[in-house]
Amino acid sequence: MPNSKLRATPRAKALIASIVAASVAGYVAIFPGQPKVHDDVALAIKTAMPWEGRQLVAHLDRIAKPPVMTICDGDTDDVRPGLVETPAGCDQRTAMKMEKRYRPALVACIAKWGEQPLSWRGMMLSLSWNIGAGGACGSTAARIVNDAARQSQRPDYIASCEAARAWNRAGGRFRVGLDNRRGMGDASRIGEGELCRSGV
């Protein structure tokens, strides 16, 4: 895809390499005292968490339509006003929700999930954490890979990485922060597109 604005970066390559180095049989111990998670889940968590902004006290996310109670790293499950979580509790919430809900949904909807590049899988999981598994499964980014798999062709991963950038709106409005998250990130955070491009 010659017009792609995404490019590989040393920091994204270093993140991918750190996950590969820590992986044992495809699993990574990402949080102390917590069960190991798949390498793609670990990569997604390392990418998504800085963008989510951890909050230990439940708060109302007013950007969401409709507004929703949120805690930890953007978790909305079983969150009620006044709920307070510990850092370890947030670690567990994030890791187990990504591992047991989001990853299985993507494994089910993406052809040959385990054969796709680690950076692409990490990008898709980070995307799903933000827009929902249904949104990720129905995205053009997923369709590009699934269509190629049905035709026994190599997917155009760069086009898929770029297609995920379309998810840059919240509450019906374009958001610079989401555009950065979907693309090349910012000075301190790796973007999902940057991650994706750095490993395909």
Image: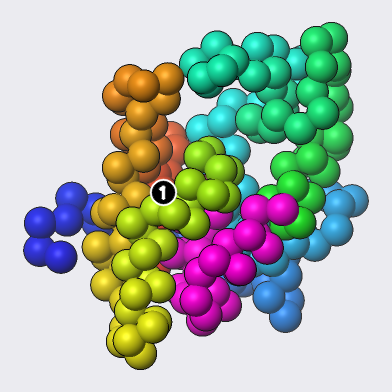
State the extent of the magenta-drawn residues as a range: 101-128
Q: What amino acid does circle 1 point to?
A: Glu
Q: Based on the picture, tell me whether residue 122 belongs to the magenta stretch.
A: yes
Q: Which residue is mark 1?
A: 192
Where is residue 12? Give x, y as percent. 42, 55
- On the image, which quarter does residue 77 sit in? top right
Q: Quadrant of residue 105?
A: bottom right
Q: Position of residue 43 (x, y in %)?
A: 57, 57
The single residue placed furthest to the left in the displayed view is 2
Regarding mark 1 in the picture, which secondary structure is present there?
helix
Q: Is residue 17 left or right of residue 156?
A: right
Q: Main secondary structure of the magenta part?
A: helix
Identified at 62% across, 48% down, the residue is 45
Q: Tell me what residue is drawn at x 69 percent, y 22 percent.
A: 70
Which residue is at the front of the view, 139 or 35?
A: 139
Compared to residue 8, the image places residue 25 above or below, namely below
Q: Is residue 169 visible to us here?
A: yes
Question: From the viewer's perspective, is residue 179 above or below residue 66?
Answer: below
Is disc 1 surrounded by few (<14), some (14 to 19) or many (20+) residues within 10 Å?
many
Residue 134 x %, y %: 54, 49
| Identity of the residue drawn at 74% across and 47% down | 97
Determine whether 33 is above or below 154 in the image. above
Give the answer, above or below, for where 38 lies relative to 182: below
Give percent across and percent down for residue 178. 38, 31
Screen quadrant of the N terminus? bottom left
* 108 magenta-colored: yes
What is the quadrant of residue 103 in the picture?
Answer: bottom right
* Residue 76 horizontal side relative to residue 172, left or right: right
Tell which of 35 and 133 is nearer to you.
133
**Quadrant position of the C terminus in the picture:** bottom left
Image point (56%, 17%), residue name: 66
